[in-house]
Image: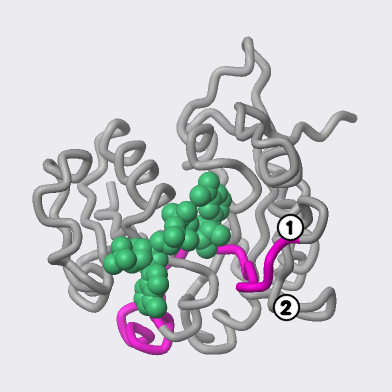
Amino acid sequence: MKKVAILGAGMVGQTLAGGFSKHGYEVVIGTHDVSKHEGDPSLSHIPVLPYADAAKEGELIVFAVKGSAAEDVAKEIAESLKGKTVIDTTNPIADAAPEGGVLNFFTSLHDSLMERLQKIVPEARFVKAWNSVGASTMVNPDFGGVRPSMFICGNDEVARKEVATLLDQFGWDTEDMGGAVAARAIEPLCILWCIPGIAKNDWGKRAFKLLR
Ligand SMILES: NC(=O)c1ccc[n+]([C@@H]2O[C@H](COP(=O)([O-])OP(=O)(O)OC[C@H]3O[C@@H](n4cnc5c(N)ncnc54)[C@H](OP(=O)(O)O)[C@@H]3O)[C@@H](O)[C@H]2O)c1
């Protein structure tokens, strides 16, 4: 089993760190301010390191940093991402306030954050996943026996298959949308998912399911 480095110690980083640990993986967390997380009980069993050190240790990387910081973090640790599968959970959420419950992105429909990250580190094998659900439902969610769909994409087919296997372990059916350009469609699913939360403070359990 690969050693997993989760970059980002927010809700997503902590949830996925718990999930990977539960499934028997060795996990480290990376953050830009280690001191902020000292004594955090939810991270007591997981080493918290600076981004660069965590990325060096990880054989599989999970990118879970704030969207607006993602490009800078990718530049900072580019060398350690080369040749590795990088699961990208980030969303390009802009600082501007949502309008009628609808988040603003700093990307357009002709662009996506993951494509930008892929351009920064062409040798990394980015796969978009876990960006279109709330953190609380990322690990083996219970939808009364129905497995929800996770839309993924990325330029490397082997990396996409690796992530699909992981998602299966975490209770998700994978919908593989092909190359990184599909992130232009997958990232905005976050906007849709968040509308009931922002508009009606309903952050309850929900996920997308593709029916055929
Ligand atoms: N929350 C969700 O339910 C959810 C669901 C799906 C996808 N996402 C996406 O997943 C990513 C992580 O979300 P999140 O809710 O866990 O937390 P977040 O608040 O969006 O990001 C948390 C992480 O980003 C780091 N960070 C913040 N500003 C930074 C900067 N200027 N430079 C470097 N690092 C910085 C924080 O570092 P420190 O800990 O050191 O402060 C923290 O580790 C986001 O892109 C989000 O859009 C979130």
Q: Are marks 2 and 1 in contact (CB under 8 Å)?
A: no
Residue 163 seen in render: no
Residue most extreme to the right: 212
Residue on which disc 1 sits: 186
Q: Is residue 43 above or below residue 113?
A: above
Residue 48 seen in render: yes
Check if residue 81 falls in the magenta segment. Answer: yes
Residue most extreme to the top: 144
User: Who is closer to the viewer here, 113 or 203?
Assistant: 203
Q: Is residue 52 above or below residue 174?
A: below
Q: Position of residue 181 (x, y in %)?
A: 75, 72
* Residue in the picture at 20% in, 67% down: 57
* Residue in the picture at 80% in, 60% down: 99
Location of the C terminus by quadrant is top right
Task: Check mark 2 vs ligand 1: CB closer than 8 Å? yes or no.
Answer: no
Q: Is residue 110 above or below residue 84?
A: below
Numbered range of the magenta stretch: 73-98
Q: Position of residue 157 (x, y in %)?
A: 62, 62
Residue on which disc 2 sits: 107
Q: Is residue 86 left or right of residue 187?
A: left
- Residue 112, by quadrant, is bottom right
Q: CA distance from mark 2 to mark 1?
A: 13 Å
